[in-house]
Image: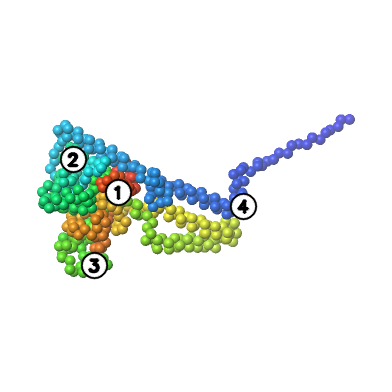
Amino acid sequence: MTSVTNVMKPTIYLTRPLPRLHLLANYLLSQPRLALTLAFSIVYLLTLAWHYPLSSHDPSSIFFSNAHGYDKRYSLVREAQSLSFINATHYLADSSSSPTTPPPASPSICLGIATVARPTTQYVTLTVGSVLEGLTTEERADIHFIFFIAHTDPSVHPVYQEPWTRLLPDTYLSYLGLPVSQLSNLRKWEEEHDYRSKGLFDYSYLLDSCYTKTSAPYIAILEGDVLAVRGWYARALAAAEHIDSLDPHDEDDPYLPPPSSDVGRANPDSIPTQDLPKASWLYLRLFHTETYLGWNKESWPTYLPLSALTFLLTSSTLLLLRAMLPTSARRSPFLSNPSLLLITLIFIPLSILLFFLLGRPTVLPLPRPPPAGVQRMDNYGCCSQALVFARRQVPFVRQRIAERRVDYVDMLMEVAAGAWGMQRWTVEPSLVQHVGGMSSKGDAVADERAGRIWAFGFERWPEGGAPEP
């Protein structure tokens, strides 16, 4: 008799073991506060990574990079273009084929650039090349360029013998013809290294030269250690004309200081009419540094209430949304009281903190209204690298310089504007960059200060320069 042995058949499972990702998901669903923390951390880090390229070049940010924050980007492009333009000018001079053109009869802008010899690097060649390179024939014909070597003996300046100093300017300015007493003072200031007295005189002298030698409605005074973006002229002129279109004052209707100003509170009726400003705006700034546009301490009475309001509104919104959900949804562990406490007491404050840590120019950049991003900047403007004045305002500016209430042009302008309640304007981004890392004063402290006067937004111009306004 044959016996039959029962053999057990293997068990076949129709479902696979859960992948590790599913296991992690199930675990996080069972740990809602851990899941919320992980999600918040990812979003937080992604936000930081997204903004870091700007924050690392934002001096008001904790993430500002001392190693790379002042890196040249567009400036390198502009320096190469400027030197190429100057070299081409020298080639024309050597070939005796350099064209001679008469100064423009009716320029729109008188451009004045003054320079003094520096201990090592001379930047003025780059300055002149950058303001002229890229101009159209019509634009160049609309500018009267005055170049001023501010030495009683101009030959001590290293650029004195360079051909471009005679070929490119429409007017070559010197101290020739000044009264003996003024020349004596100038030599004394040079010998005593009195940069403040001489700097104020030179600024006023160059400003007055533009005023008397041309009929240009606008006068731009640039320091000799800056770079201008290609396309600067069209944007600067559009901005100045726009500001003037908003100003009702002229020679026949001078500007009266408001009662709230220092002069207005004194006795404005005692001011002779000829001494009154002829415009309500003092200057248009072509350069500003973001260093002073951060979270300034005097504004914290505004920042703190707004931060508290943001916290309260966000927390209240979360509670209101939970109350509006169906009962079954409100039972979700992600909407439990401990989870909401985690969001309101940890996540929201950390988000507000990150907002401030990223830096004000990063999270609240200046607007760029047409034309050319022109806007008011009555506070935190720095410095005097490139200022544009209305022609009718020059006598008022010269008088303020003569009063010499302070020793630096930029500070003097701010004091005058504040005392008279006058507007100050700028363009965003800056049309000019300060590249003078070596001060003309020849001391280490001045050099360090000069190296930090930087327009961070200027470096973000595209290689082709500024578009038409």
* Label 1: few (<14), some (14–19) or many (≥20) C-alpha neighbours in 10 Å: some
Q: Nearer the viewer, residue 140 or 380?
A: 380
- Tag nearer the camera, 2 or 4: 2
Residue 312 place in picture, x, y as percent = 48, 63
Residue beneath label 1, please?
446
Looking at the image, can residue 195 be seen? yes
Q: Identify the disc placed on residue 160.
A: 2
Mark 1 or mark 3: whose residue is earlier in sequence: 3
Q: Identify the disc placed on residue 386.
A: none
Q: Nearer the viewer, residue 275 or 26?
A: 275
- Tag nearer the camera, 2 or 3: 2
In space, the residues marked 2 and 3 are separated at their CA atoms by 47 Å
In space, the residues marked 1 and 4 are separated at their CA atoms by 62 Å
Mark 1 or mark 4: whose residue is earlier in sequence: 4
Residue beneath label 4, please?
30
Mark 2 or mark 3: whose residue is earlier in sequence: 2
In space, the residues marked 1 and 3 are separated at their CA atoms by 37 Å
Identify the secondary structure beneath mark 4: helix
Residue 276 place in picture, x, y as percent = 18, 63
Identify the secondary structure beneath mark 2: loop
The three-letter code of the residue at mark 2 reads: Tyr
Residue pictured at 17% horizontal, 66% vertical? 271
Mark 4 or mark 3: whose residue is earlier in sequence: 4
Residue pictured at 60% horizontal, 52% vertical? 31
Residue beneath label 3, please?
264
Residue pictured at 86% horizontal, 30% vertical? 2
Mark 1 or mark 2: whose residue is earlier in sequence: 2
* Label 4: few (<14), some (14–19) or many (≥20) C-alpha neighbours in 10 Å: few
- Tag nearer the camera, 4 or 3: 3
